[in-house]
Amino acid sequence: MASLDNPQGAQGSHDDYFYSTFVVEYIVPRGHEAIFRQWYERLTRAARGFEGYTRTDLCPPLDCGDGVVKWYSIVHFRTPKELNRWLKSSDHAEIFEQGRDTFLAYRYKSFSTGLEGWFSSHTGGGEQSSLGPPPWKQVLAVVLGLYPTIVIQGMVFSALGIMQTWPMPTSLVINNLITSSILTWVVMPRVSRVLSFWLRPAYRLTALQTNIIGAGLVLTALALMASLFNYLA
């Protein structure tokens, strides 16, 4: 008898046992269960039409009291690429917009670049979604926060004579700890808030004009800061 540890006679590789899975938590007002099911069936039918779709699991509702009922959906695709194609599709975006009156809020997580943690608190309109913005937006936003943090921190430490005589490996690890802490708890939450119109979750289609405006603002801010720091240096 074949097993996962000794798959002699098994069909396919170990990868065949794993899927790319997407979990969503919906908050549905009590009494809207039937409407939500109808809407969810439309979403599932649309997903079936995409290559790589495996199956969808809708868990039994969880009654949390105070009129709040939570539903958990698990969508399976063969590969991350096929899953992302569905999540970024116009069909997915359109059906989600149609469901705005069906559920109060939803949330999910999907990590791919390692930077999404700085954008995972994006909220708005009763929605909390933790699918990060497209990677190129994450990079620009992180550089926008990281660049002035590093420069100002270096200027302050230099002026105060902090760690100037320390061995480079030691000073580097301390500087990185300080920089990462400032970014995580001070800088990036504010960058995410200011650029929230542009740092939309990757599943949402953003207008080209909005993308250009957001990228232009970030690049302009970086250029102005570079000019200012060069003047002060």
Image (tube, grey):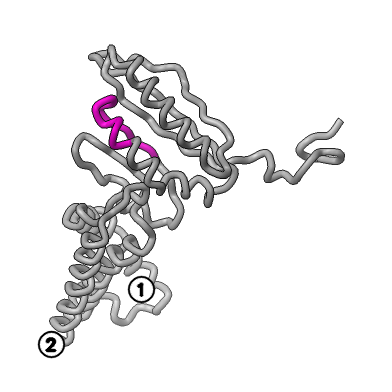
Residue found at x 45% / y 35%: 46
Asked which quadrant contains residue 178, the reply is bottom left
Which quadrant of the figure contains the N terminus?
A: top right
Q: Is residue 103 magenta?
A: yes
The spot of residue 4 in percent (x, y) is 76, 38
User: Is residue 151 rendered to the left or right of residue 38?
Assistant: left
Residue found at x 23% / y 54%: 192
Residue at disc 2, secondary structure: helix
Q: Residue under circle 1?
A: 171
The spot of residue 80 in percent (x, y) is 53, 49
- Stretch in magenta: 96-108
Look at discs 1 and 2 and give the one toward the viewer.
Answer: 2
Q: Earlier in the sequence, mark 1 or mark 2?
A: 1
Q: Residue under circle 2?
A: 231
User: Is residue 46 rendered to the left or right of residue 9?
Assistant: left
- Mark 1 touching mark 2, by CB under 8 A? no
Asked which quadrant contains residue 208, the reply is bottom left
Q: Would residue 160 be seen by someone viewing this image from the given angle?
A: no
Q: Is residue 25 above or below residue 151?
A: above
Q: CA distance from mark 1 to mark 2?
A: 26 Å
Q: Is residue 51 above or below residue 176?
A: above
Which quadrant of the figure contains the C terminus?
A: bottom left
Residue found at x 31% / y 25%: 27
Q: Would residue 155 be seen by someone viewing this image from the given angle?
A: yes
Residue found at x 74% / y 46%: 13
The spot of residue 149 in percent (x, y) is 23, 69
Q: Is residue 195 above or below residue 56?
A: below
Viewer-closest of 134 and 109:
134
